[in-house]
Amino acid sequence: MDLQRLQRALSLEAEVGFTDLRGREQTFSQFLGSVFGQDPPSDWVLNGDDRRRWKELGSRYTLYSELELPERQHLVAETRRWLERVRRQQELSRPSSHQPGSFAASLPQRSGFPAVGVATTPPEAGRSTISPSLPAGLSLEQPLQFLKGIGPKSAEKLAQLGLHSVRDALYYFPRDYLDYSRRVLIRQAKVGETVTLVGTVKSCSCFTSPKNPSLTIFNLKIADKSGVITLSRFYSGRQFAQRSWQASLERQYPKGALVAASGLVKKGRLGLTLDNPQLEVLGGEGEELDRLGKILPVYPLSEGIPADLVRKAVQLALPAAALVEDPLPADLKRQLQLLDLPVALQQIHFPETRELLAQARRRLVFDEFFYLQLSLLQRRHRYRAQAQAIPRYQPARGELLDRFYQILPFQLTAAQQRAIDEILADLRDPLPMNRLLQGDVGSGKTVVAVAALLAAIQSGWQAALMAPTEVLAEQHYRKLVEWLSQLQVPVELLTGSTPPAKRREILRQLQTGELPLVVGTHALIQPAVQFRNLGLVVIDEQHRFGVEQRAALQQKGDHPDVLTMTATPIPRTLTLALHGDLDVTQIDELPPGRKPVHTLVARPGDRLQVMRLIEREIAQGRQAYVVLPLIEESEKLDLKSAIEEHQRLQEKVFPQFRVGLLHGRLTSSEKEAVIAAFRRRELDILVSTTVVEVGVDVPNASVMLVEHAERFGLSQLHQLRGRVGRGSDQAYCILMTGSKSEEALRRLKVLEQSHDGFFIAEMDLRFRGPGEVMGTRQSGLPDFALASLMEDQEVLQLARQAAEQLIVQDPDLKRWPPLSRILEERQARLLGPGLLT
């Protein structure tokens, strides 16, 4: 009898809830009774006690169908625990050429691959919890169904998680870990400590809160020999209120199941509990005892896929880690103290210590960042190599630029001058520029961009400035006309609203070269738009364009210089991840004389005072914005709508003032008419959605009230706040929130305390994560399996530096063929189609 077959039968019985599973010919208890009713296999080495246990189990399983559920659970767990001990005895009795348990010793010795992990860790560091022997025929591409103990049915379940091959299992990283070294009894739990409790499910319920239909409450009561504890989790959203979803959650925790719960101990309404506990259903009591003192991986799962199945698949695949090629140069690994890749893969799944887990994660995070940076830097090198390297620009102090500096009604800040100098140096370089200009709200990026545009024009080239909205494009156009008309430099505006006759004339002048500068929206990338000699492309709010749209404008010329701008400060980690192929300039200084906007977080009880502030400011000749997240009333969200609030303010709150309405559903001409009326002071209050986030410049506006401020990101609120305080008067930004969430209030308090856009962006990244900060639709953000742009900034910097070193030495990586091959394999999966365009 195969021991593994016995264990599989016991595991299946536990999975189905100890129901005496029926097979094709026998029930579970009949099968076990017949097995233990015979003599043990001759090749099993059993002592006298084990032989007596064998016979005893035979008689006990003949009575299995008559046992109560707890008795069945106990018997199955006891049997599994005993068989596991027997299995270990069999292994120890076999001769082995390897040091027992030594994972590092089992690795093939390859030249140039020092045992970095072993050298930098204690003597026991390389030891694995998995047997080091490599099963015959095991390969990285072997389908999981052919692993002993998996089979077709289990393989189908694993395939739902994207796990098809041994390689897939190796790179399916845990999402969390249960640290059984921190296991305590329920009565030993103390407030403020992070612990792991293991207990039997006494009851489980999941229901919709009677007070809040959008809140689902999950309660789980578990007990051990020392006491009972009730654990709760909360799910916000109507999708969790469906009874089918709640019932499926309850089924995961059947009465009598053994559960591990980890989390911070706190005092709740019903006594001690765990804060947002991490829950894991164990395969049985016996398995739980074997795990004490170990770190158990917790994998991402889908409904109907048991955790033990995934762990089993990974365990069976883990010996194949020895076959994984480590492409990193040996000196690089030594320099950065990185684990060998096979060791890192083993320790990320079943770490022996927290220290080894940290080292394994560091190596794998480094790989994710490193291949990303290699790809970005290699792309930049190839783009520049394709361009014709010829000087195209006059010296920085041309006549047009000199006259521009003379007509400016203000002095450039040191940061603006530094940015201009960096851009002009790029323009004089024979290779094309590809630079990102970052600047906080009101830092003066437009002046810097105009200097670059004039440098191109005075050198005989055409230039284009593309903005994401007509409002912003028109804003830029007005500013450029104001300045360039004094320099006799023609500029035109091309948008979707441009009249056909005017459009045809602009297209003709661009094609002949008569028109040196055009400002526009997506209209600039239409096939009919042809330039005679496009030399510079400026893209404002570049993150609002897709990669293909930005590339389409660049293709209007022969490798033109590209300057992209954003008024949304991006943390350096995000900049490296998204724009690692760009040079970056930051304008980190505001023009002198700008007063900080006085920012306050307000509660519903403060509304009367807020209305009085708005009334006072308007009475003194100034204007106000009221910003809301929705256009019309929503049935799903209890939020004020722009349309409803406009009507309420005009009719009930401020009937003596003129209240306008601006939102995204208006046509371009309607939006411009409303903004123009507000700019001419024909409106006192402008009720708006986030259309005003960029491109609306009304220096007379001194108050902004943001309703439901908790619904916005910090960077977006900072952008909105930048619409006021553009004049000489003291300005105010009121963030109104009715949220009771402590985290929401902490987020909003950041804006009270700081006006530094880069600091605010960093905090936004920490609170919401990169996907929310950048927007998932067009951000091009890589999908990392382990790496965190918030927690792994140091590793990202190391990866960037290492990639730069290799690209400088050999841009095509011909000196490192394995590295080049792995990079090509990973590019599509790691970067996604957006960044490869």
Image (tube, helix red, strand yellow):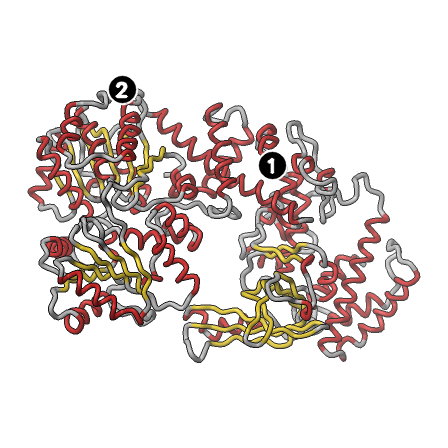
Mark 2 residue crowding within 10 angstroms, few (<14) / some (14–19) / many (20+): few
**Pointer 2 and pointer 1: residues touching (CB < 8 Å)?**
no
Amino acid type for the residue under numbered disc 1:
Leu
Q: Nearer the viewer, residue 769 or 526?
A: 769
Q: How far across and down, in percent of the image, does residue 245 sit?
A: 49, 71
Whether residue 756 is situated above or below residue 209 in the rendered picture: above
Q: SS at mark 2?
A: loop
Name the residue rendered at 20%, 56% in the picture: 702
Quarter residue 273 falls in: bottom right
Amino acid type for the residue under numbered disc 2:
Pro
Is there any visible trace of residue 462 in the rendered image? yes
Q: Nearer the viewer, residue 736 or 56?
A: 736
Q: How far across and down, in percent of the image, does residue 201 sit?
A: 64, 73
Q: Tell me if 795 is positioned left or right of 223 in this view.
A: left
Q: How far across and down, in percent of the image, does residue 289 sit?
A: 74, 62
* Residue 391 circle label: 2
Identify the image quadrant of the N terminus: bottom right
Name the residue rendered at 71%, 76% in the picture: 69
* Residue 338 circle label: 1
Name the residue rendered at 54%, 28% in the picture: 817
Identify the image quadrant of the C terminus: top left
Whether residue 424 is situated above or below residue 579 in the rendered picture: above
Quarter residue 356 falls in: top right
Whether residue 49 is situated above or below residue 825 in the rendered picture: below
* Residue 183 circle label: none
Is there any visible trace of residue 26 in the rendered image? no
Q: Tell me if 737 is positioned left or right of 829 in this view.
A: left
In the picture as drawn, the residue positioned furthest to the right comes out as 48
First in sequence, mark 2 or 1: give its number.
1
Q: Nearer the viewer, residue 190 or 154?
A: 190
Mark 1 residue crowding within 10 angstroms, few (<14) / some (14–19) / many (20+): many
In the picture as drawn, the residue positioned furthest to the top comes out as 390
